[in-house]
Image (spheres, rainbow, N blue to C red):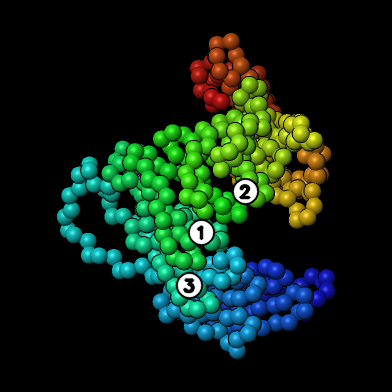
Amino acid sequence: MFTDDRLRQLPGIMAYTITQDQLLLQETDTLRWVDLVSGRTLFMWHGVAGQSAFDGRQLAFTEGNVLRYYHPGMDSAIVLQGSCAGGLQFSGDGSYLQYQLPLSAPAQVEKLRIWSYQDYYLQTPPAIPITINYCLADGTSFTVNPPGTQIVWQRGGRYIIIQNSLNHQEYYWNKQITNTLYLVDTHTGVQKMITANTSKLLLQPSISPDERFMTWYDHSTKSIYSYEIAAGYIRKLIKGIGVAGWSAGDSSVFIHSENDVWQADPSGVRRPVRLTNGKRHRLVFRQVYPDIFAVFNTHTKANGFWKREQGVLRACVMEDRLFYMPDYPLDQYVPVKAKDTCLYLVAGMSGASGPDLLATTDFRHFTTLTKVHPEDRYNWLKVTLTKYACFINRRILIRPKSIQSSFTTMRAVKIICTGIWYRV
């Protein structure tokens, strides 16, 4: 059925998943598993299915609150759990399945309740679902996040990070609860407390690709910390704002500071090395891929990409348009690398034109793949970065692209001089 290059339309498909040359089709009343290499089709379930998890080797799905499971060695899907609320996810090696229990019925609300400033929540705390980790080999299971905790990081590996449930909206003024991070071993079910902070939040917890280290940002010291999982050591690395990535074998961690990218040793043996020199030149560097950096000029507002080639960092493109920066709200269009090639897909936009998709192999030359410009039908805006003598800071002037009269021009100048500006 799918063994040639012909284009086909499949009607009635509600959702689909493709992984490892295997296709799962969720139709209105059928689950269908298709091998894209051989074209073989298995009708997995006749009936309405809810959520599903599919890794190309096995399938889990819900029917109402019933959790069912199937792999190719079975005659049909079996029931794993009679009370499941979804949240289905296989571990990376396929040996474990996670699912969530249904939330308990809310307690009856009192007619009158009085709070004080010392209460951690000045409203009813949100319900957090309990996640179960189920071993497919022997049928054993354990609770990942006990009541009062929540999952803050997981990628399908051996370890999951949880923390005690926090009221982030009120935490800045009401710090009655200590922020604590725990490491959960999905092989053993052991939950270990790693670090706690009684005054500030612990943010951006994550685990390195080879699962040798756990890292987080401590708001008290404004620094990045690492925890060596095998040895149990905690180390303060450098002042920074977040982890950018890792080298092979978890031997180095790349950390973003306010303007630059640093290479640090998570085991604390080698001294940190600054890879960029952004602060001196009013540039902000952010690592996108190894040796590829998104760059923003805080003075001219130009954005672009730099590359490290033969040990030297060079500018590839810097233009008066937005490509990408991993900071909200500029983080919507992440450059995507094609598998096993040096071809990248990026976006480019400006105040005068909508986002277009561009292809590049060197970040110097771009091939435009789309031309979606609805603003061409209007007298769209024109954006000018400028500085007038009466202002110290640089400003952005936004006006229609085509000005019809000198009266409009004078009115724009009047608005400028009365201070109605967007400060940058």
Q: Residues within 10 Å of mark 1 (few under 14, many from 20)?
A: many
Tell me the amino acid under the disc marked 1.
Answer: Tyr
Q: Residue at x 53, y 61 (%)?
A: 158
Position above or below: 193 against 28: above
x and y percent of residue 207 in the render? 54, 51
Q: What's under tag 2, amino acid-wise?
A: Asp
Q: Type of residue at label 3?
A: Tyr
Q: Residue at x 50, y 17 (%)?
A: 418
**Front: mark 2 or 3:** 2
Which residue is outermost to the top?
389
* Residue assigned mark 3: 134
The number of discs equals 3
Q: Against 419, is 274 above or below?
A: below
Earlier in the chain: of badge 2 and badge 1, it is 1
The residue under the point 17% across, 49% down is 114
Graded by Cα atoms within 10 Å as few (under 14), some (14 to 19) or many (20 or more), the crowding at tag 3 reads many
- CB-based contact (under 8 Å), mark 2 and mark 3: no
Left or right, 9 with reference to 212: right
**Residue pointed to by mark 2:** 250
